[in-house]
Image: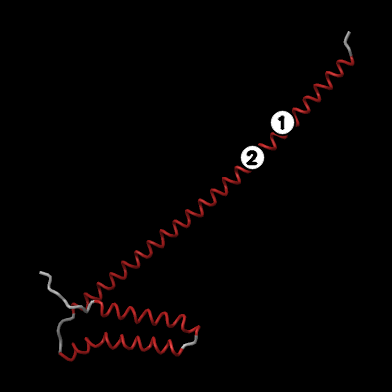
Amino acid sequence: MVDIAGLAASAAGGGLFGLVGTVIGRVAGVVEARQAQAHERARWAHEGEMQKLRLEAEAAGREVDLRATEAAGAWAGLSASMAAEAAIGESYRWVNAVRALTRPVLTILLWAITGAVFFGADAAGREGVVDTATFAATAATLWWFGDRGARRDLR
């Protein structure tokens, strides 16, 4: 005959053991899911940082390209200006004298304007206007007189 108490104890023990196994499996599943989520969060954070760095690198590359384009345009403008001046032939003496005095007179006027603005402007006005006037006067001085050195025949 079958021992009912033993059968009941075996059923209860098997059920309890199965329940404990299920709980352990579920806890392990929750731990694995949390680890997977943490891994995904770390991966997405890394991907976001990499995308940010890519965008910064692209922006820096565009800025370098823009500066190179600006520099090329500035050199082209200077070359065209010098070629236009070289194309002007000799004329009357007074015309040549006026042409020769144009740069010095304009430079003196630019520096006079810069000084007048600097001493006449308030603090807020000095920031924008003086910077622009100083830039113009310095550029004029260096550009207009930078090519005025003694010309040597290179043969």
Quadrant of the snapshot with the N terminus: top right
* Residue 107 drawn at (x, y percent): 31, 85
Q: Quadrant of residue 151?
A: bottom left
Marks 2 and 1: CB-CB under 8 Å?
no
The residue positioned 37% from the left and 61% from the top of the image is 65
Furthest-top residue in view?
Answer: 1
Furthest-left residue in view?
Answer: 155
* Residue 132 drawn at (x, y percent): 41, 80
Residue 30 placement, left or right of 12 = left
Quadrant of the snapshot with the C terminus: bottom left
> Relative to 116, is 10 above or below?
above
Residue type, label 1 = Gly
Number of disc labels:
2
Under tag 2, what secondary structure?
Answer: helix
* Residue 137 drawn at (x, y percent): 34, 82
User: Mark on residue 102?
Assistant: none
Q: How did the renderer colour the structure? A: secondary structure
Gap in angstroms between the C-alphas marked 2 and 1:
15 Å
Under tag 1, what secondary structure?
Answer: helix
Q: Quadrant of residue 88?
A: bottom left
Badge 1 crowding class, 10 Å Cα cut-off, few under 14, some 14 to 19, many 20 or more, is: few
- Residue occupied by mark 2: 35
- Residue occupied by mark 1: 25
Residue type, label 2 = Gln
> Relative to 71, is 147 above or below?
below
* Residue 69 drawn at (x, y percent): 34, 65
The residue positioned 19% from the left and 77% from the top of the image is 86
Marks 2 and 1, the one that precedes in the sequence: 1
The residue positioned 39% from the left and 86% from the top of the image is 114
Residue 91 placement, left or right of 22 = left
The residue positioned 89% from the left and 16% from the top of the image is 5
